[in-house]
Image: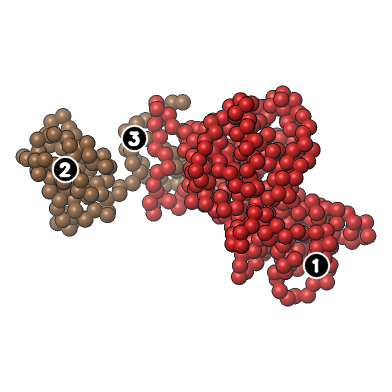
Amino acid sequence: MTCPVRNRSFIPPVELGDYPVGTAFPAGHLVDTNAAWRSLRPVIDATACSNCLICWLLCPDGVIQRHDRGALQIDYDYCKGCGICARECRQKAISMENEGNYGT
Amino acid sequence: MERETKAFLSGNEAVARAVRLARPHVIAAYPITPQTTVIERLAEMVEEESLKSEYLHVESEHSALSACIGASAVGARTFTATSSQGLLYMAECLHYASGGRFPIVMMNANRSVALPWNIYGDQRDSLSLLDCGWIQAYAEDAQESLDLVLQAYAIAEHSEVLTPMMINLDGFVITHTYELVNVPGQNEIDLFLPPFRTTNKMDFDCPMSLAFTAGPAYNQAFKQLQHLAMLKASRVIGEVEERFGRLVGRNYPGLIETLYCGDAEYIIVTLGSVAGTIRPVIEKLRSGGERVGLVRIRYMRPFPDAEIRRALAGAKAVGVLEKDISFGFEGTVFTNVSSALMRSQVVPPRLLNFVGGLGGKDISAADIELIFKRLKNSEPGETVEFI
């Protein structure tokens, strides 16, 4: 079997024929944003972050992204705001801020 | 067994033989009367290595179907069997299986549901789950049970269908009654039923997201696709039966079987083993000049609405005889038949609903004669009559 393209961007289905048969789809992307239930958002203070990656390891939804250089980034399309990253951060570099302040 | 043989088998044993011929990768089941002997025979076959399947010991029916869902999701052919309370216990998983489009094949031994506690046959277990998205077939005897299991894999795994299928056998009357059964040879079944191939499977080189979420924007489309696939199954069932007839040598009539409906004025519509009681009564009454007939529903989903309209077009009165009741209204089969007739261009015939056989209560030849008498002389009154 030829492997479908990985890491492709999500194209929303329009016609019935655009949908997969059953709930199986090539891995590599999520099919919907899912962040509306977040009341608090984690915000990383780049100056305090030591890049230890404990938050990256412990995030249950895998939404903390690391980069070769610079601070970690959070994918707010999928972060549910559980706060595990802020609680576990040893540098106290992550604060949970009121989502309302961000107008979302 | 390379060639066809004749064997003296119960309905359950006939199903076990069919499952062996279908070469499933995974069997997961939990014992419950009157299904138990199916999975006992299968366990023996795996033990003696005449069947090479992974036989999973599970702690409940919920787990049995969950295991089949997991196995089917990675591309395996699967089988499970249950009955009554067990079927109801897997109700949640029934929707998972159909929504995921996993072509699992399951035998259900039709049995009453508690309370009062009862292990004997009626059809309230499966008929109360018509809406779970499974194809539902009802057998009349052991031979048809065996053939339906083999056809079920071909129907369920068809690329345009990909829907699980439940084969219903009346508890004890079919499951435990011994008959002479033709068991096809492995060669002809290997031709009829090649291995299950699906692109929807777990593959380390091409990973798939399985059993994902779909929110309000996308969810309904998946349900609409399930509905369309079930409608397509009507055509596929005919094609599979045609191919089965050609390769195995037994022919089946599609979603319904009709007897003398061409000229019958009074017709009983029913499903399952009770048709075997009705046939000789019809022969007897017809030899006395009475124009009576039978429609035996073989598939409740997809529902044979057009077939039923055609079969009943010339009838003066129709009685639906079924082993279930939707309390406070009428039998579910009656509701379905009435709905099909309401779409007809001809005036619907007089319709009566006979409910019998609950908790295994006997339906005798005398009861059938009485139903035909009521069809001829019925006055409008109570729609549902308990026999």
Residue at 66%, 31% in the rendered image = B21
- Whether discs 2 and 3 lie on one chain: the answer is yes
Q: Residues within 10 Å of mark 1 (few under 14, many from 20)?
A: many
Q: Look at the numbered discs 2 and 1 and tell me whether their residues touch, using CB distance below 8 Å.
A: no
Dividing the picture into quadrants, the one containing residue B30 is top right
Colour logic = by chain
In the rendered image of this protein, does residue B46 appear above or below residue B360? above
Residue corresponding to mark 3:
A28
Q: Secondary structure at mark 2?
A: helix
Disc marking residue B271: none
Label 3: few (<14), some or many (≥20) within 10 Å? Answer: some
Q: Which residue is mark 1?
A: B375
Location of the C terminus of chain A (image quadrant) = bottom left
Q: What residue lies at 64% left-to-right and 64% top-to-bottom?
A: B325
Residues under numbered marks 1 and 3 in contact, where contact means CB atoms less than 8 Å apart: no
Instruction: Determine whether the residue tagged by mark 3 lies in a helix, strand or loop.
Output: loop
Distance from disc 1 to disc 3, alpha carbons, whole Å, reads 63 Å
- Residue B131 appears at what percent x and percent y? 56, 55
Q: What color was chain B assigned in the picture?
A: red
Q: Furthest-left residue in view? A: A47
Q: For mark 2, what is the residue?
A: A88
Q: What shade does chain A have?
A: brown
Give the x, y percent position of residue B377: 83, 72
